[in-house]
Image (cartoon, coloured by chain):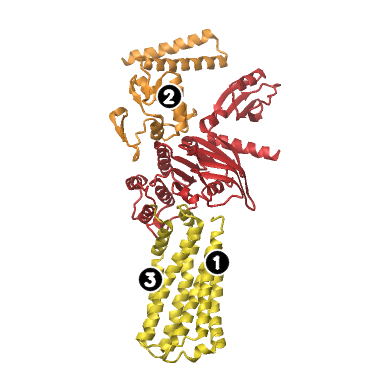
Amino acid sequence: MKPNVAWQLILKDFRLNSLVIIFTIAGGAIALAILLIGGQTPVVIGTVFFFVSMVFCACLLPLQNIVNERKKQTLSFVMSLPVSSARYGAAKLVSTVGMFLVLWLTLLGAGLYMILGRHILPIGAIPMGMILMNLPLIGFCLIAGTALVTESEGWATAAMAVVNSSYWLVWYILVSQVPSLTKTWGGPVAVWSSAVFKILGVEFGLIGLILGLTLYLQSRKRSFI
Amino acid sequence: MNDYAIELNGVCKSYRFFELQDVALRLQRGTIMGLIGPNGAGKSTTIRILMGLVCPDRGEVRVLGHRIPDEQVAAKWDIGFASDDMRLYDSRTLGWHINFMKSIYSSWDDTYAQLLLKRFGLHAEQKIKGLSHGQRVKATLLLVFARRPKLLVLDEPTTGLDPVARHDILRELTAVMVEDGRSVLFSSQNTQDVEQISDQITFIDRGRIIDSMDKEVYLDRWRRLRLEAPSGVELPALPGVIEIQQTGRLAVAIANAFEPHLANAYESSGARVQAVENMTLEEIFVANVERSREEVKA
Amino acid sequence: MSNPLEFPLGRKCLTGSLTVYTVYTQMFVISQSDKRPMYLQIMEQMKQRIAVGDWAPGQAIPSIRQLAVDIGVSVITVKRAYLELEREGMIVTRQGKGCFVASGSDIGARIREQELAQHLEQAVRSAAMMGLSQKNLEKRIRAIYDRVTDKEKETV
């Protein structure tokens, strides 16, 4: 029974980037610690920090895991292993997304604990919070997908620039165009309106589309070097 | 079960400033082939094509019986590849890489790996970023050798190595031949290395294969004749002689299809043959490349 | 399956079919700066071993592959050396059994004879190129012979 090379590659990526994951989770932990202090200013700072650590990870991980493989010339080492370009791409995407999810799920869980357990924020903030949490996830998928498909640091950086400057724009659009979101976020009850579901649906749909497109384009490649 | 470890037929690949044209190459199982050519001749491109890293525009590629690039995964289980632009993970140790290879290849021979560590003067606990160029190359090759692959494909394995390191690597390359059926393809700028350990030599220049044959036969075809042509004697142009350089009464003729009667032909034209010398592969390399470039011009 | 290989000087090298950790005994040293082709150098050194007596008539010699690995040269070069030596009658290959020094106690003497013949032929050719007459050549050879044997008498 031949060992699963793709799986070994995923494990290898996790091992290589363990420091990045730990570092960003530490950043998130600091953000939550600030939140626990309580009071208006710390809550604002803590929340901003919370999102910044995700945005930071969304940029750093694709650079470290995807772009560096080509830059540091370890790509030919990996491609000399019994793996095809398509499987390599898939494994790389899985490991990069997987590592980001470690941070994202940790922060999601911690965030929910903050709201439900410690009452730092009102429960009504959960739907909007969920929508906002998905933004770095979508941004990350876009950056990672671009990095993998274009094999170019330049394009990956461009994607980062576009994504990072879009967060505020999206926030603005959501708040101004969907007033139902902001109406109930200060309340004691989480309101899952159809608008919320529609937006969440679009967000998850986007994630699926970006990842699917990435896998498709990667499998169409004819040369790796 | 096929007789050839590598078969390329009519392989073409064009880039903006370079074109690989009609490359045909056959590596017999159980032999070592040295691929030589000037910089930019297409050695690395040819190797990348047979490893499935680059897809050719046209042509057939078969490695260990598998079609490339469609069946490259099956082929790569039995191929050990190393190129001079390949790097290992800087932040990890050599031992980490050994364990990584072990997790993938069941053919990993740990005893041999330990022996090579000693022979190459390396330590498993060393981080890759702390290694010198020569040590890094040896480490990369160790990861290939210790797997005992059926086919080794090495792009410039001895480039930039000191004489002792080169000697060590060549030793391990020839040791591959102890086991029946294992093959090696390596490209090199070092004609001495190629001359010493290759069973077959393939010459490539400007994207074309100019020669590919048995090394002993090849070396036997080339001779340098030192001639003395007394005044009034015109040196004839003989078949098999590709170049004559004459200054005054002394001339040097280079033959790439030498037969003993060639010397007699010169003698009967009035010239005296002072010496018939064998040529080193390096001298053949230069003469060959110059000849093929003249032919292309004409 | 293992075949013990006995090299001169009594060093044994065990080779198994799967795990071969070759011990390089460097039986012969091939020089890249030597103008002669490698296969000729190998042939000469093998003949020397026979002439000196390290390899006795009828004794087994390393296989082509094993020698190639030991010296660090291509199999095809060693193959050519073996073929030429077999043609000259210095070694024999027995199907399935391996390679052996040809039997016959005069092998050593035959090799030395061959060497002498080569040297003499070279001397005559050089003399002819210089235009030396046969009589003058004989005179010179006699002078050298006297000088060399005189020296030997002195050292005795």
Q: Which residue is disc 2 drawn over?
A: C44
CA gap between label 2 and label 3 equals: 67 Å
Q: Which residue is disc 3 drawn over?
A: A22
B18 relative to C123, above or below: below
Marks 1 & 3, CB-CB < 8 Å contact: no
Residue under disc 2 on the same chain as residue under disc 3: no
Mark 3: few/some/many CA within 10 Å (<14, 14-19, 20+): few
Instruction: Name the element at disc 1.
Output: helix
User: Is residue A13 toward the left or the right of residue B259 in the image?
Assistant: left
Chain identity for the colour orange used in the image: C
CA gap between label 1 and label 2 equals: 68 Å
Q: Which residue is disc 1 drawn over?
A: A213
Instruction: Name the element at disc 3.
Output: helix
Q: Nearer the viewer, mark 1 or mark 2?
A: 1
Colour assigned to chain A in the rendering is yellow
What is the three-letter code of the residue carrying label 3? Ile
Residue at 46% in and 89% down: A185
Q: Nearer the viewer, mark 2 or mark 3?
A: 3
Colour assigned to chain B in the rendering is red
A29 relative to C23, above or below: below
User: How many numbered discs sit on the rendered protein?
Assistant: 3
**Quick check: can you spot residue A151?**
no
